[in-house]
Image (cartoon, rainbow, N blue to C red):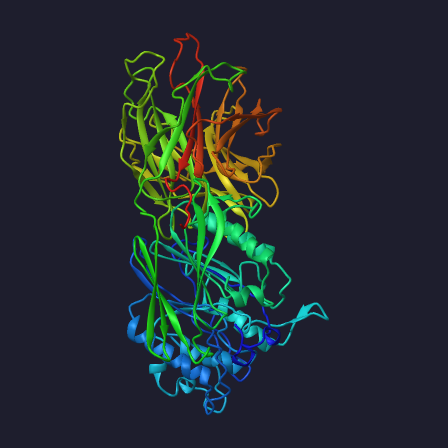
Amino acid sequence: MFSTNSRLTVGLVTSILTMSLVLLIVACSNDDDSGTHEDPITGTANQENAGDPHWIKLGDIPLDIVDLAIPFIADTHIDSGNSDYIEDNTKRAWDVVKDINNNFRSSPFAIHLGDMTNGNNTQYLVAFRQIFEDNYPGNDGGAIAGAADDDYDAYCDDTTENRIDIPVFPCIGNHDDPPFHYDSGKPYLDTDWWKAVHYISDRVGPPPYTVDRLDDHAYVVRYGKYVFIVLGSWAGSYNHEDKDAINLDKLKWLKRTLRENVGNSGLGVIICQHYGWEYFSTTGDWWDSNQRNLELRALLRNESYPSSQKSTPYNILAIMTGHNHGLETVTVSAGQDHHGNDINFYNFVSRSGGAEHHDKFGYSSMHLSANEMIIYDHELYTRTVTEHTRQITTAVMDEPDNFKWNIAYDTMDTAWLFPQAWNNSIMDSRPNTGSTEFGGGVASGDIDRNGEEESIDVVFAAIDSQPGAKRFYYRIGYNYGIQEDPPWSPRTFRSWGTIQYSPDISWDVKGAGADLADIDGNGVLDLVLMWVDDPPGGNTFRYIVGWNLDANGTATSWSEPVVGPVHGDVSQGAGVAVTDVDGDGYLDIICMAIDAPSGPNSFRYCVGFDIQVTDPLDTPEPSEWSGIIQAPFDLGYWSGGGGFDVADLDGNGQPEFIFVNLDDPEEENGFWCYIGWNIGVDGKATAWDDKVAFNRSGTPWWSAGAGFAIDEFYNFWGNPTDTLDFILMAVDDPTQGWSQH
């Protein structure tokens, strides 16, 4: 924010664009970390070292919390030079801290909205830390100018009453980050200017302390049914001042983390950043209309905004900002949703917590419930509290997602992609329970071993988005095709099993698949569940086996995870099949992922040859893996999931690979199917067929995974020859986009 002396004229303000995309969603994490991290406490404090804080640790995060109160602090502009000279900004910050301690000691955390300090002085950051770190000094508090190194209360007026009692998540504002040398085209290199910037990653840890973090720029924390996203100056700012620059990588990060960590869950999102939509931010030399539209595109899920006014936004409850020093409320109009409702984002501009504005200062607090958000302005000079209320909608997280599926009958050998009929004119739906992470799969077989002809059981699987490590949940539809109705009536399953769960798998999953096979050769089907592990860096295929399913689909035991090859850095779907590819009598596993780089998506797969297991205590890993093979198809830029299976379509004794992409445009999704013909012993196709598209009515608009299986589900025409059928499955979120009215 601007300093006290520069309020009257914008031209005197040093504009420093930075962004700390602080998506505070504490529940997810990367699985390369089993949940243990050590604080990076190193070095000795001195006059050049502000010290190293502990990472903020919120402990176990409840995911079902709806009622929540969070304080917001802005523009403290801490500028204490030494322990004998305390500026008025710091004294006002003490009043803010004491009021928060008196009224919000039970809140899990507070959020700062930027301009924590007033410039490039090591002692400014030391003073900020002493006042706004609940667990100060951590290990190394920093030397105090004019005081002993162990005087950890010098900037608190030698009393811990002036230190906050709850964690404060930091955010960079334009007074915290390095200025930009327009003559040289580089930011200031003075290390003092970078200390507040580096404080972000020093104070806020990577997963599992947060859901996501982008170096010094941004991080994500979840609490209950709310996701807090702190964006520094704005969603495309760098961590130094350059008003004309746009950090496209940071904007991509925001889009990715919103898509992967919020998606269609309906979770309430609170954006936290320094610049807002009020008069001062939009007319000063801070950010322009093009930059504001770039941020809105991410929140709207609309890359064509504002030329395209129809969007499906995330459930943005509020955009909390500072910078203005005075209280403002702004309605940000952003077109309409696909139902024709106006999209209006609510920007609440919090008053200064240090630098006074027209003899006023204070902070704000947000009080959330299932259908109401109240933001209070706490003005501490006159001790006045004012209320701003909005009606909201927050997702009920135990609402079921749906498995949406359709079965195609009697595909005729090489014309298999043109089925003779479908089981229904629209996608059938079967509820599961819980919220879905990205990934799903479907597989068929005789699980209940009832011996009835013309019946088959189907496993529907998806990833459960529990906090921390994820897991699969799956549900079985029994005895498809057994009924007395005329053959032209829709088929269905005779019964459905209960939801069952796998052991915990990875922290981050970006695609999954399922298959059934008798891996240990004892005549009982085993369940293979494969997922794409998505840590920072390269993604890997991983799978587990649920051994010897009983008639209820319950595994007698589970294998340890098997780790496959690295196949790319970003994925948007996956699939798996278990069969004997090379004809040597041993089962092989084929793992497929949809690679999603910055350009068009594509299929990548590999073959794990010869899984030789005779005992469930054995690890079901192949003797060797093929290299990564890329299918020659352009899948477009967005996939809602993938599927994969194997069949001998032309009856020549060589298998075909069938790849499925669930295309995910800003409208009803569609299935794209491709074939790799006559797979050799090396797992490579001798020829490829381009896509055939199936746009089935009722396919979700927003999908969290997909699946494909090919089998003999039902003899529709009473055909004496064996003809193959196939099932297409999508994991649908019931929350179809959100808008604020």
Question: Measured along the vertical axis of the image, is residue 116 above or below residue 221?
Answer: below
| Viewer-closest of 679 and 692 | 692
Question: Measured along the vertical axis of the image, is residue 101 above or below residue 420?
Answer: below
Q: Is residue 317 left or right of residue 11?
A: left
Q: Say which quarter of the image contains residue 329.
A: bottom left
- Return the x and y of residue 352 as percentages of the image width and height: 45, 74
- Return the x and y of residue 421 as percentages of the image width and height: 43, 16
Q: Is residue 380 left or right of residue 349?
A: left
**Residue extending furthest right?**
183
Residue at the location (34% across, 35% down)? 547
- Return the x and y of residue 593 as percentages of the image width and height: 52, 38
| Viewer-closest of 45 and 586 | 45
Question: Measured along the vertical axis of the image, is residue 4 above or below residue 406?
Answer: below
Q: Is residue 510 left or right of residue 684?
A: left
Residue at the location (54% across, 66% down)? 281
- Count of picture labels: 0
